[in-house]
Image (cartoon, rainbow, N blue to C red):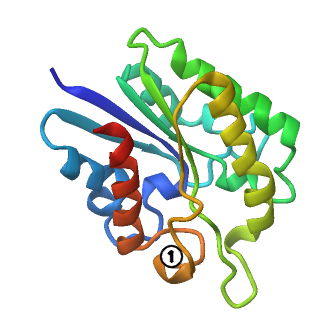
Amino acid sequence: MITRVACIGDSLTWGFSLPDPWRQSYPALLQERLGADYAVRNFGCNGASVRFDADLPYVETIAYGESRAWNPNIVLLMLGSNDATPWNWDAAAFRRDYERIVASYRELPSQPRIILIAPIRMFRVMGCTFGGLSPETLEDGVRPVIREVAGECGLPCIDLVDLFKDARYCYDGVHPNGEGTRLMVEQICLQIQ
């Protein structure tokens, strides 16, 4: 029996800034690593946020609907980076909508194993961050909420905060390069296998 793994997320999942996201994104490398007993699909959407009233709510994307229709056995949920902007951040709304997304996968007929992933650390490059994202909001807001929701819901949480010590694993301080993506896959595999 093939285990279906749905990788839910934003540009970090989709593979933004990688030369060939279809072969170099973390879901593509995860498929290689896990082998033929698994079917890994990339349901990342560039710019997607947790908040239902954000610029681009993940729940309003085609990827969200397709991921649920696929009825996965494992859900890897890595969202929150795009919520770390001054215009999207609201702790109470983020928690509420993050919990709603988790619940929407919990209610699937496949009763998937859900693994929450707190995104990689963001870095300033030449004093700026990509797209106005705030590393402080990610560390002081987004990441703690994801950890708390994991604890309250009894779900495993992979926290990638310490995976990168500096920006050398990112093209732009936010999106992982090839080496960074491989490091992410190693950490994620530890929870799946």
Viewer can see residue 133: no
For disc 1, the neighbor class at 10 Å (few under 14, some 14 to 19, many from 20) is many
Extreme-bottom residue of the structure: 126
Q: Check disc 1 and report the residue beneath it.
A: 170
Question: What's the residue at 78%, 38% (across, down)?
Answer: 94
Which SS class for mark 1? loop
Give the percent coordinates (x, y) of residue 166.
57, 80
Q: Quadrant of the N terminus?
A: top left
Say which residue appears at 65% left-offset and 76% top-offset.
123
Height in image: 21 above or below 5?
Answer: below
Is residue 72 visible in this depiction of the protein? yes
Q: Among all residues in the image, which is located at the extreme top? A: 109
- The relative height of residue 63 versus residue 28 in the rendered view (above or below) is above
The front one of 66 and 2 is 2
What is the tally of numbered marks visible in this picture?
1
Q: Name above or below for residue 162 compared with residue 114.
A: below
Q: Residue at x 74, y 82 (%)?
A: 128
x and y, in percent, of residue 144 in the image? 74, 46
Along the horizontal axis of the image, is 145 left or right of 114? right
Asked if residue 91 lies left or right of residue 13, the reply is: right
Instruction: Work out whether 69 lies above or below 10.
Output: above
Q: Find residue 60 and report its horizontal and vertical position in percent.
A: 63, 33
The amino acid beneath tag 1 is Cys
